[in-house]
Structure formats: structure tokens, C-alpha cells
Amino acid sequence: MFANLVRGLFGGDTLSRGDADDRKRRKTSHRRLRFEGCEERRLLTVTINWANPVLTLTSDGASDAVSVLGRATYVDIFVNNNFQARLQTANANNVNEIRFNGGGGTDSLTVQGIQPTGTLAIGSLGNALAGVENLTVVNGNNLTIHNGADPLNFGTSKFNGTLTVTSGGSLTQTGALTVTGTATFTVTGAGSDITLDNAANNFNNTVAITASGAGQDVALRDVNGIVLANVNVGGNLSIVANNNSTKRVAIAQTGASAVTVGGSTSLTVGSASTITLNNTGNDFHGAGGSLAVTAGANATLRDAGALNLGASNLTGNLTVTAGGDVTDAGNLVVGKVASFTVPAGFDIALDEANNDFGTVAATATGGGASVTINDLNALVLGPISTTDLTVTTDGAITQKAALSVTGTAAFTAGPLNDITLNKSTNDFNVVHIVSADDVNLRDSNNIQIAPDGGTSTVSGDLTVTAGGAITDGTGNVLATAGKTTLKGTAITLDSATNNFNELAITSGTNVSIQDADALILAASKISGTLAVQTGGELSQSGALSVKSGTTTLVAGANNVVLNHAGNDFQTVVITSAGDVALRDLNAVVLGASNVTGDLTVQANLNASNRLAISQSAPITVGGSTTLEAGSKSTITLNNAGNELHGGAGNVSVVGGGSVTLRDATAVRLGASTLTGNLSVTSGGDVTQDGPLAIAKTATFAAGANNITLDDADNDFGALAVTSAANVTVNDKNALILGASSVTNALAVTTNGAITQSGPLAIGGTATLSAGAANDIVLLNAANDFSSVGVGSGRNVALRDANAVDLALATISGTLGVTADGDITDSGALDVAGKATLKAGPLNDITLDETNNNLGEVAVVSALNVVLVNSDALILAASTISGTLDVTLGAGASGGITQSGALAVVGTATFDAPGNEITLTNSANNFSTVAIITATNASLRDINAIELGSAADGLTVTGDLAVTAGGAITDGGTLDVGGLTTLATSPLANITLDTAANAFAGAVSIASANHVALNAAGGLVLGASTISGALSVTLAGVGDLTQVGALTVAGTTTLNALATNNIDLSDPGNNFAAVSVVSGNNVTLADANDVDLGAMTVAGALSVSANGSITDSGVLSVAGDSTFKADADGDASGDIVLNSVSSFTGALSVQGGVNVQIYNNIATRLGNLFATGDLTITGNDDLDNGPWGGPYGIVSVVGNVKLDIGANDMSLNQNGWSYGTLTLICGTLTPLP
């Protein structure tokens, strides 16, 4: 409706409908109305209420477009572009809140220039916008917007500060939003969305979104980059940012924020822009949703759970980190590097057929984890670490970083595309080539290049380089149409269905190859073994070098042609073949072979003086055998199972030097003279009917048969018996025995020395006779004799790899025996010189024949050693890891002595009836020494020593002297009829604490640290110096006395029966502290101060010192106690006995300076003499004698104090002298 209004100037605070009539009715003295004219005005339907600082707008009609314009001194309000009112008391700075309640139709609000100091609220909590469909803010600062349940649309707006929007309805826009500060948008109504996708939006600070209800979608767009704070979307999230800009971070998030999306997420930025959403709390989609980057350069994405990638297109890099599986729901196009990381046990599956990556890197480790990658073009693999890897492309597959696949890596590139994965740091387990042209694989360790039961197909060449083994699977097929080149350690491609064309091994240790049909071997170098099995002919196109192992060839009925002049085999085994031609640049060894046709072997053709052709196992040839070697080379084919030709064939040696052949029947040798070697192997006996003159070595093998070469004119340079039952050999000169194995007896008789060049294994008795002037030296470490007898010989040296028995022997010189087992004797040994025995630290030596006559014996090494000798015995330097038992015969003319140091780990037991034992070498190292019987015994040990054993003890009828570098202990009872002298390091202990020990003479300790002595009866201590403690225990009847001064730096502890006396009264004693565990009368003397430890004395105690007497323990003395601290009369020693002691008898002090004594029981004073003060303290009654005397006399130069507290005191003071007398007691009674 319209009305005619008078236009004029007036002031008012509140305007509403009908205000024109009110103005005409008002009459005030201070206002004058000036008529200017009339204009046509629209009658408006908006009510305005201004109550500073809140402006309330209410519309109750049709659609209203309300504009609020702030000025420095007023606020104008327009409705539907018509001036409504001017608020003179409001201005741009004092309006803090604008409330608008819309009516019917479509209402809108535009706010311009309202900039309060704090935050402008458009709507508020409890006063939200209602019925307002559109909102525009022009040039606002900090704003909070509360909208009700209705949708709210933003017009073009600019916020120079922060923006916080809370709405119950959806948020949309028809104009761009520019927000300088943080922007926060929250929608709460069910089904309410946020759609702020204007291309000109510019959020300069962070954007936070809350639209967490189910199905609530959010769409954001920013002309520049956008930084996300916390985003929580229940439906789908779409963000477009920086779409037309380059080389900028377009979408990012704050450090502690998270993006949570219940539906799907779509991100779009400029082609050179970056997305970085790398916070750990992100969750980009819900069940059935995905995350898509529809455009951009680089994207870094992190999801706390599984991540499903929708169709994405990036010109740069994609980095994805997920807390669960990574999958794809659309094609992924990444121009550069796509990197994916999931925790252990989760998978990465990027198997969309039209994916197109530049490079892919992935980490998915743990049991069962896998990575699957599909690419419609060529693909470069970056670093990948996973359990199983599957890569499928329509182009080449290459790499730029190491691949680590602990399970199976499967690659499909198509039959026309190459696979090049040759990084040296690759670590595959199983590689499956589904299809490819040329393939180049490299692995830092082991690799399997075909899966179990699977097929790997290479239409071109295959190259595999490994730092470890190269293998194929079980029941697989590896098919290579071109050349296969392998380099690794062990190479095993032994599936029967493999099908190679040409194969080269550039490097390998042990190699095993199987091919279903013919195979060509190209130039190859193998450091170990080579095994080749083919279903067709086996030939070669280059030289084969098998440096150290066996070459095994299996060709069935097909031919083997390996006759290249550069071949270098070691051992060749031909399991099956038709005709075979082999050639070797050097020597060749033929292993077990079965050739149904002809065998031709050429070896070492240009060399001389070398073994050219030999064998390691039987050879069976159905046709003929042709052998060729250098003119001075050797051919040795001596296997017992050889069948070197068939019925119509023969064995030919085209060239060669020495030849050794084996015959299946017996061999008889006539007179023969050879300048080289003779090797004869027979299936029966070997005998002779004429002399044999062999300048070098004659080798014989007869299996279980005998060899009898007993012609007196035989002259061998050396003789070896590879096998035989019994062997008899005569030689008119010296003889060298080569490596020999004889089941039973060996008898060798010569007129010269008997030596050896190889080990001898003799199952029976070896009887050696070289004459009394000739030596026998059989020192090979591998010798294995059962028993050895010497009929005659000068110096004899024997060695055995196991145990050896010495039979009857007569030796005019020395005997040396070394064995790796026990050494025993079964006959008397008569050795004029020194016998040296070595059995090893784990084996025994037992030479216990009573008629042995050994002058001197040295044991280099043995476990337990037993030596029985009929006469005196000298022990040379010996090392024994077990026990030593030496026994002399009853009629021996001398004792047991030594010429070198003895080292015995176990117990050394000596028995020298009627003779002495003198083992005083300073380097001796015993563990335990037991003596069955001897007169005098002198022992020395560089370390600790134990005397006596539990079984045998130590019995010496005379003196015992022991010197050790370590502790001296006893392991059994010691019975010494004479003096005992013990010496060890000042830091080492002596512990002879067996209760049954018996020392008839004095025991002297020359030096030791702590000393413990036990004796079954009395004990006399000789002069001793002890740097630690001394403990003496007497288990039976007998006193403890001394015949020399004792110096003990530590505590001396004495323990005797309560009926036994202890008398250590030598004035030269120097104790530190003395304790008495038990004793009858105890007498102690000390040249210096002495401390009394705990004492229990059944009789009297007398202590004399040339210094002070103190106590550190409680004294319990049943008899009288006498102390003298002034033995030399120089008045220099105090007596201080303050422990809670018990002195039952009379307490006497014969000398001292200041005296302090405490008695915990009744005290009886004897004579007390002191040059200083005297203090007696007690805990019971005190007297100085029985009634009627005699009475103790007190003679003290200083003061006397007797203090017994409240107890009674009875004294006779006649003859007392003192300075002052202090008596503290309950009752004092004079004694008559």
C-alpha cells in the first residue's frame, strides 16, 4: 500500500508502521517542522528495535530485503532498497548484535560497515536468525552467525576478521566469501549440508567444518589455497582450491587437526598445486566411500584407518599413509611418484585396469600383507617393502629403488614388453614372470624365479643376478625363448618341465639345471658343482669353467658333446648318455659314470708332470674308452668297480705318462724295475715271484685279500697299501711307508730306517724291525694303529689318530708316542732313553706293566695318566688335563723326581714306598696332590694347590714342604710325620680345614693371606707370617702351642676343645686381633697392640702386649683374667676392655697406663697396677677377694674409679695406692 508522507528532518529512536502519523501529532517546544514538499513512500513491513548494543529486526509480511549500513555517527536501515530509518544513537562501532526474525516469503539481510571493537553477532545462541534465507556482509570484521533451522544462503561477503557460523539448516552461497581470519562452519539439522563452492571464495586462514550428521554433505571452494582445521562431515566432502594457480599448497591442515568424513572425499586443486592432509587422525571416508583427488600436482594423504582411493589425477607425486588397507575404487593417474604405506599385516590393492602411475613406492609388511599394482602403461617401481607383490602393466616394468618382497613377486608386462629390475639392493623371495619379453632381475641374496606349481614365461632373454641362491619352484615351468644368463651363488633350476634354449652361468657356486629337451651351454663360470639333465642332446657354444666341484651330466640315450678346448672341469659324473666326448684344459676327474656308447676323454694335453685323468667312482663304458693326456702326465683309473669297455670295446691311452689301472682279479707281480710309480689294485691276493725294484712309490690294493712281498732283494722307494688283510714286506734298504690300510697284521723288516709319507691304518699288530742301529719314525697325524711292537730299533717315534697299544718293545734310544686316543701297554717296555707321550687332553695314558723299565717320562698332553715303573722315575715337563697316578715298584732304587714342569688339572697321586718325592719345579701347576706313601715330600706349584684327595689323602712319614703361587687347600686328610712348611703369595689363602688332619711336627707359614688350619689333635705352630686372617681349629684332644713367632695382619681365631690349652706366648708375636671360639687356659703375647675379639675361655686368660690391649668383642672367661700392656716396661700401653664381657675369676692388670674394664657379672679384683688412671665398671657386685683374703692390691699412679651402680661393693683397701678414689655402689662393705 502507498501513502503520502511529509518529507522533513527530525530525530527519533524508534520507527515503525504509522510513525508518520505520530510525527504529525507530536508537538514539542524545541522542534520546528519545515515543509519542503511531499513524495510517494512505500509503507514497509519491518519492525526495528534498537536497544544498545542489540539491533532487532522483525518482518511480518512478504519477502523483505533488509540492509543495515553502519556509519561513524548513525546507522541507516533500508528495506527492499528503500530507506527505512536512521538510528541516530547507533553507529558502526556500537552495534554488537543484529537479530532478524523473518516473516513469510524470502527474507534477506545485508550488513555493511558494522565493525564493533569485538565480535559482531548476527543472531545469537537463543536468538538465532529465523526465516532469513539470505545473508550478505560487506566489509565486516569478526563475526559470529547463529542461524535457526532454515537454510541460509550467503551473498558476496567479506570478513576482515574471523567468521563463525552455526546453522540448523543448510549453508549455501550465491556470492563469494572472503574471510581474512579463521572460518568455522557448523550445521546441526538433520540432512543439512554446507555448499560453499563459489569459485571466488577466499579463505585466508583456517577453515573448520562440523556437519557430522548422517548424510550431511560439504562442498568447499577457494580461489587460493585452503587450510583445514578440524573437519567432521557425516556425508560427502568436496574441496576445490587454487584451481587456477600453480606451484602452491592448495589444501592443507593445521598440525593437530583431523578430517573425518562419513561418506566420500573429493579434492581438486590446480595442476601444479599441492595437497597436504597428513595428520594422523584423518578418516577420509566411511564404509563404501572413497577419497578422490580429481586434479592437482602433488598430494600427501594420511588416514587413520583403511583408505579407498577414488578416481584421481595428479601431475606430480601422491603420498598415501593409511592405518589399514589401501584400495582403489577408480582409476589413479599419477604423473610422478605414488607412494603408499600401511601398517604391518595390511594390504595395498591398486588393481584398477586403467591406473597410470609414473613411479610406485609401497610399504605393506607383516604376515599376509600384499601389494597389488595395475598400470595401463609402463611402470617404474620405487622402494617397495611387502610380503606379496603383484604388478600388471601394458608396458615395461623398471625400477628406481630397491624392492623387498618376502613372499611372491608376480610381474606381467605382456610378451612384447621388458622387465628390468636390476637394483643391487633388491630382496625378493619368489619372482613369478607371468609374461614379458626380455627380463633382467637382480637380488641382494636368494631368489626363486618361478613359483611352486606356476609358469614363468619369457619370450626374449632372461638375466638373473643374485647375491645368494637362484632357484625355481616345485612343479613349475620356467620357459625362456632366448638366452638365459644367471649369476648368483647356488643356482638350482631343476624342474623337469623347464625349457631353456641357450643358458650361461656367469657366476655360480653349485649349479643344477634341468631342461625338457636339447640344451646349449654358453660360456659359464662355476665355482662349485654343476649338474645338468636334459631330454635331448647336450652341447656347448662357449667354454665351461667348473672350478672346484663336480659336474654331473644326465642325457639319457642322447649324446653329450662338451669338447671345447677351453673347458675346465674338476670331477665329471656321467649318469647316463649315448656317446660322450669330453675335453679339459687341465686335469679331469671322472666320477661314477655310465656311458652306453663310446667314451673319449682328453685332458691336460699341453702340460706335463701333472695328473691328467683320474676318477672318484666306478666307470662303466658299453663301447670303447679312449684316453689322452700330456706326454708326462698321469692317468689313474683305479676304481674297483670299473668296467672300462664292453665286450667288443677296449681301453686306449693315446698319450700319457704314468698309468694306474685296477684289475678285478688277483695279481701276481714278477721281477720289476720302475723309475716312476707303480699302482696295482687287485680283486684277489697280490704276490710276487721275483724281486721288485720301484724307484718311486709302489701302491697296492687287495681289498680283503693278502699282500705278500717277502723277497729279500726287494728295493722300494716307498710302499703303500691301500687295502689288504695281512701284509708282509721285506726291503734290503730303508723303506718309506706310504698311506696304507691293513685290516689285520703288518710285518715290516728292513736293513735301514723305516719312515712314512702317508698315514697307516693297521687293524692288527704292526711289528717293526729296523735293526738296533736304525730309527723308526712313523709320525703321520692320521696313523691308526691297534697295537705296535718293536722287534728292534734305535730312536722310535710313533703317532696315532686314535688309541694305540704298545706291545713288547726293545728300544736302544728314545721313544716318542703321539695319539689322539688312549695310550696303553700290553707288553713290557724297555726304553733306554727318554719316553715322550702325547695323547691329547681328552685321552688317557696307562702304562701299568709292572716290568716296565722307563728312565724318564714326559707327557706332552693327556687326560688321565697312570705310570708304573720298576725303578726310580724322572718326570719331564708334562701337561695333563685329568689325573696323574705314578707308582714305583717296592724295590725301586730311587724316588720320584722331575726334570721339567708338571701341569696336572686333576688329582696327581704319587706312591714311592721308602723313597722321597721331590717335585719343586717353580712352574709346576697342580690341582690336587695325593701321596699314598713317601718319606719326605717337597712340592711346588705356580698357582693354587690342593693337598690330599678324598680317596687317598696325603701321607708323609717325614717332612712336607709346599710352596704355591696361589691358595693351598686340602681335599683329604693330611698325615705328616715331620715338619710342615707352607708358603704362598701374600694375597693367597691357605685352608687346611679337614678335621682329621694330623701334624706331628710344627706347621710353619712362610707367607700367606688368610690361613685356616684344622687338626685332629694338638698343633704346634712354627714361625709364620700371615698378611690376612688366621683360623686354627683343633677337633680332638691336644693343646695349641708355638715354637716360633707369629705375625698375623688380620684376625686370629682360635678354636680348641674346652679342655685344651692355647699357649701363644712367644713375645715376638704380632697379632692384629685375636678371638677364641673355645679353649681352656689361653695365653697370648703380642709385641705391639692387640685387639681381643669375642672369646669363650673355659679356664684362665692371660694377655701380654708391648702396646695397648683393646676389645672388639665380648670376652667370657670362666677363670682368672690377667692383662699386661706394658711388657717392656716403658709405660706406653693402655688397656680398654669396654665390651659387655664376663670375667668370672679374678681380674688382674700387671701393667698398663690407663685402664678401663667393664664386667657384666660380679667382679673380683686381683692385683691392679697402672701408671695412669684405672676405671672398673660393672653390672653386678664387686670385691677384691673372698672374706678373709687374700685380697687384691690396687697400685695406680692416677685416679681410680670403681662403678657398679646400685650393686654391693666389698673391699679391703690395705696396701692400696692411688691419686683419688671414686666408688659408686649401693652398699660398701669393708673386708677384714
Image (spheres, rainbow, N blue to C red):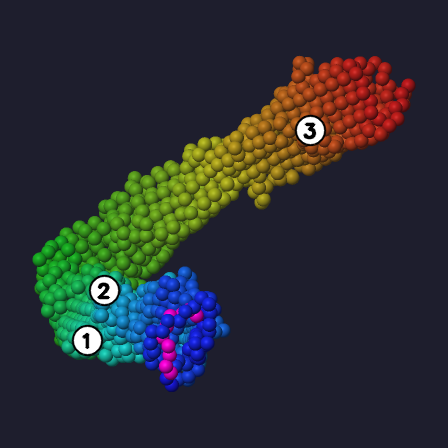
Q: Is residue 1227 magenta?
A: no
Horizontal and vertical percent for residue 1098? 76, 32
Judging from the image, what secondary structure is the residue with disc 2 in?
strand
Q: Is residue 311 visible?
A: yes
What residue is shown at x 41% (from left), y 67% (from top)?
88
Provide the residue span drawn in magenta.
Answer: 3-12
Horizontal and vertical percent for residue 607? 10, 56
Amino acid bearing label 2: Lys
Image label count: 3
Sequence order check, earlier mark of 3 and 1? 1
- The Cα–Cα distance between marks 3 and 1, rounded to whole angstroms, is 100 Å
Residue 514 appears in which quarter of the rendering? bottom left
Pick whichever, 1137 or 129, lies toward us: 129
What residue is shown at x 69% (from left), y 21% (from top)?
1134
Residue that mark 1 sits on: 377
Q: Is residue 1120 visible?
A: no
Amino acid bearing label 3: Asp
The 10 Å Cα crowd at callout 3, few under 14, some 14 to 19, many 20 or more, is many
Pick whichever, 360 or 267, lies toward us: 267
User: In the picture provided, is 544 more to the left or to the right than 160?
Assistant: left
Pick whichever, 15 or 1212, lies toward us: 15
Residue that mark 2 sits on: 247
Residue that mark 3 sits on: 1111
Horizontal and vertical percent for residue 121? 43, 68
Sequence order check, earlier mark of 2 and 1? 2
Q: Nearer the viewer, mark 2 or mark 1?
A: 2
Pick whichever, 981 or 332, lies toward us: 332
User: In the picture provided, is 667 more to the left or to the right than 347?
Assistant: left
Sequence order check, earlier mark of 2 and 3? 2
Residue 639 appears in which quarter of the rendering? bottom left
